[in-house]
Image (cartoon, grey):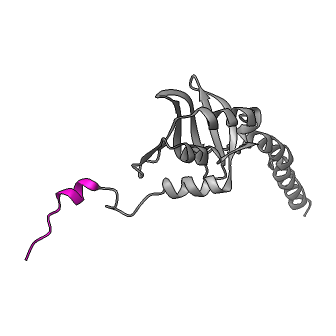
Amino acid sequence: MSRYFTLLLVLSALVLCCKPNSKSDGSNSSTATNRALEFEPLSAAILSDMNKSITSIDIISLKKEVNASMSFSDAQAIQYVISFISEEKGILTACKPEGHLVFQINGEITQEADIYYNDGCNAIVWNKGNKISNINKISNEGVDFFKNFLKPHPSGINDSTIKANTVSPQK
């Protein structure tokens, strides 16, 4: 009987010793989860300057299944897109960018950013010299706009070549 008790005691000790410490894992992951915490958002002053000076914005899909891009050169449309950029820090976890923004003044690229809004992310990630410089949050209206524009469409809708080459029989 004492052999079984000793064996049970040894097995219990092994189980308790090998159990991961959830407290230390949780505290490390909460600070490491949001990569945006180490970057400041673009300030309200910079966003205001962009509203006044940007002459065009290009939105480019980075999704393989969405072949779309859009360019805005109307001042009201530019201000509308810039209004999606919150002054708050974004949320950037282990997700992939959905789209890319290119901001231009008279044809010269002045700012570039990637758009993240899925898998727990909500961020516009500003890049300078292939490095992250700032991270802003996207407004709820902006997330809805980008999701609608950058969503995959049913097969064939975006394929203008098929439509152009399809001849309907005439009677």
For the magenta stretch, what is the residue range?
160-171
Quarter of the figure with residue 113: top right
Q: Residue 39 in the image: state x and y as whole percent.
A: 73, 32
- In the picture shown, does residue 101 fall above or below 23? above
Which residue occupies 44% across, 58% down?
152
Residue that extends furthest to the top in the rendered view of this protein: 129
The reply, left or right, for residue 79 in relation to residue 9 is: left
Which residue occupies 62% across, 43% down?
82
Judging depth in this view, the residue of 81 and 131 nearest the camera is 81
Q: Is residue 30 visible?
A: yes
Judging depth in this view, the residue of 75 and 37 nearest the camera is 75
The reply, left or right, for residue 74 in relation to residue 50 is: left
- In the picture shown, does residue 159 fall above or below 167? above
Quarter of the figure with residue 7: bottom right
Q: Residue 15 in the image: state x and y as whole percent.
A: 82, 53
Q: Residue 154 in the image: state x and y as whole percent.
A: 38, 64
